[in-house]
Image (cartoon, coloured by chain):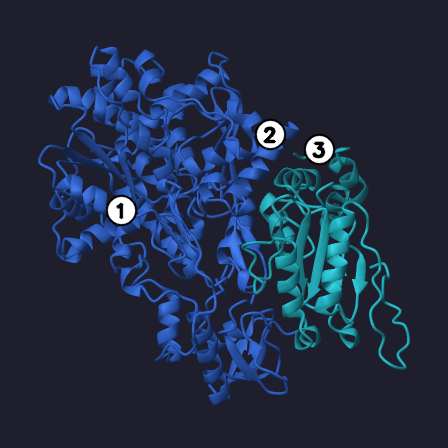
Chain colours: A blue, B cyan
Amino acid sequence: MSDTITLSVDGRPVAVSPGSTILEACAASGVKVPTLCHLSEVCSNASCGICVVEVEGARGLVRSCAQQAREGMKVTTASARVLESRRTVVELLLASHPEDCLSCLRLGSCELNQVAEQVGVRKRAYPPVRAPRKLDAISAAIVRDNDKCILCGRCVEVCSEVQGVSAIDYAGRGLGSRVATFGDRSLADSVCVSCGQCTVVCPTGALTERDETDEVLALLRDPDKVVIVETAPAIRASLGEALGMDPGALVTGRMAAALRRLGFARVFDTQFAADLTIMEEGNELLARIAGKAKGKLPMLTSCSPGWISFVETFYPELLPHVSSCKSPQQMFGAVAKSWWAEKEGIDPEKLVVVSIMPCTAKKAEAKRPEMRDAWLWWKGKGRAAEPFQDVDYALSTRELARMIRRVGLDFARLPEESFDDPLGASTGAATIFAATGGVMEAAVRTAYELVTGEALPGIELKAVRGFQGLKSATLALAGKELTVGVAHTLKNARAVLDGIAAGTSPYTFVEIMTCPGGCVGGGGQPVLPDWDKRLARAEAIYHEDRKLHFRKSHENPAVAALYKDFLGEPLGHLSHELLHTEYKRKEVR
Amino acid sequence: MDSRASVFDVEAAAERLRGKPGALLGLLEEIQDSDPARYLSEENLKRAAAALAVPPSQVWSVATFYGFFNLQPQGRRTITVCRGTACHTRGSLGLLKDAASLLGCEGYDPNSEGAFTTADREYTIRTVACFGQCALAPVVMIDDEIYSRMTPGRLVAVLSGAKKRGAKKAAHVPRRRYEGEAAPSVEGARR
């Protein structure tokens, strides 16, 4: 049996591996067949009908994304019939699509727009036939505009097959077909965990993040406010890409420069809080192992808010396994609005904390009603004030790119600048939070040293790196064998949780990240990711880690100063007030 | 006012159907048939989802796809007018409008594909794409009885009779036979 098959594409022979689709064979022969529904690794449901080609002997046009290439096949990719058919299909899709491209968030990154251009649409060929739909803009994270939906099904597929959430599915039929939640409710009233993976695969503006750039720009221009910013680890490896650079462009210094030019009073780093998280979470784990802390083993990480919503919705009985540590975003807000504001003499009511996140779920997390511990702290000091959230706005990578373009910064030409002290100081351990396995590796770098008094040999924990869905490593720690696990995507998280529920879980500690590849593949990242782009972003992250002088969270001098000055010790009284939280069962009506 | 004589045991039915092809469809059918208002309440849809371990969004997908699943409580009596081509050319739109006005379906859009139930939940009026009885067009179904070659006058008679008799079933109203025509076998047949 041969390991390749040969077919002809437009008269030229091309060899591909058996099982390849005609679409892949065309790509191998240098022909980019347009598609709107197909997305490698996500879905190939042949719903859009744009990728048609002619195959000799076939009765009609063939959808190249769904048909396998066969030995000796003769494919014609651009006959008059093919080109006309593709154009007609796109014209039909456009019949009921709103003509408001200029005010659409996806202007410039819209695949429907690109494909319409590619197939040569030059007029509105058909009148609209679909009744207008209701805009779903209730969720804190995601806005759904079904008028712009072309029913490609990518969102449905990613929600069920990648995330195992199934918040949405097709509903109705014929002209009434739509993507809907149970009961046609808002995403906010569904099992949606706000992960935003639908927003990165949507080919149009039907699913987008809730854009909050106007609100933040207005605050930045308000002389009465002090607006500070924290940037998540993953942003430095994806902001460049969002601004037209190659995937994996590492832009830490330029990002700091851009944020300063946007008018942020201080440019801080969520990585500071990531190091703080490791101090708290590492100690929490050791306390749980020693039986000195409430909470069960295996302990599950709590950095990823989509995952928190997931476990609160689908596995509430396992909540005692989840670390009580807030996510770095929220630890940052609580520390900035308490300790730092007091130290700087800034009225906490005038202080605005903006975070830049690779994430949509972070928007929902920032709005959680219990996330106002700095306000409670001030209240405890006798300062009665209107309640305020620890983090005011969580913007996605895409929104930051939009703000940078809005004010006209020539990003590529910005100088490399640094973060401000003290909340901008961080280590390589915090940087790698951005990739799946990074939190685990950072925790092990610190915990190993706390327990053994020796540095982790080789410092890098390679076993938990990479994009395998479930990874594990076994460590010898103080005479004990400790097995740790790492899962990314909620479907893999489900497997871990089912193991815990069944009592068969071999782990003591598990890192769980909501999105494919971890935060580098987050729902707030540049749209249309694939594993190559996620890999490029992750490589940039590991490269940054290797460059840094401090690579273990407990070496962060600013974190050490925070404990000395203010918090006392990890898991201490103030830590519990400001850095830890509780979870509760999420009821979906 | 939704007085349920008995609550259908969704879980028991799911147990019986689990693993069989079309289990979800079968379960939804059984739930609807057992419901006094012949519809699938959201509560029951959720129970079906939980009982078969299917995501609720998928249950919603199936329930909204099939026209015979009702998502609203149905009237005590259902009038179904065929809107297929043959029936249309023989005046089914007029019949639909007549039925709607006679039964007091204010606000009903005869061009919509949706069903309409009167505020007192006495009547539901709905359309069907085709009964498959095109030779006998136009066709109207009242509850489970199919009336062929319906005329506006006969429709009024049947519906007025039904209204007067209240709970009783509409009596069969004979229509004028065409010369030499055999008695149609569908008349009054159970669906």
Label 1 and label 3 in one chain: no
Identified at 64% across, 85% down, the residue is: A59
Q: Which residue is at the front of the view, A118 or A534?
A: A118
Q: Which residue is at the front of the view, A548 or B180?
A: B180
Q: Is residue A205 above or below residue A461?
A: below
Q: Is residue A14 above or below residue A224?
A: below
The label number, if any, that marks residue A500 in the structure image: 2
Q: Could you tell me the amino acid type at mark 2? A: Ile
Q: Could you tell me the amino acid type at mark 3? A: Ser
**For marks 2 and 1 on the same chain, the one whose residue lies earlier in the sequence:** 1
Disc 2 versus disc 1: distance between alpha carbons? 35 Å
Q: Residues within 10 Å of mark 2 (few under 14, many from 20)?
A: some
Label 2 and label 1 in one chain: yes
Identified at 48% across, 88% down, the residue is: A79
Disc 1 versus disc 3: distance between alpha carbons? 62 Å
Q: Could you tell me the amino acid type at mark 1? A: Arg
Please tell me whether mark 2 or mark 3 is closer to you in this view.
3
Q: Residues within 10 Å of mark 1 (few under 14, many from 20)?
A: many
Q: Is residue A456 above or below residue A250?
A: above
Q: If the image is split into quadrants, where does the C terminus of chain A sit? A: top right
Q: Quickly name the residue at label 1.
A: A236
The label number, if any, that marks residue B37 in the structure image: none
Instruction: Check the residue under mark 2 and report the chain it is in.
Output: A
Image quarter for residue A274? top left
Residue B125 image offset from top left, x and y in percent: 66, 56
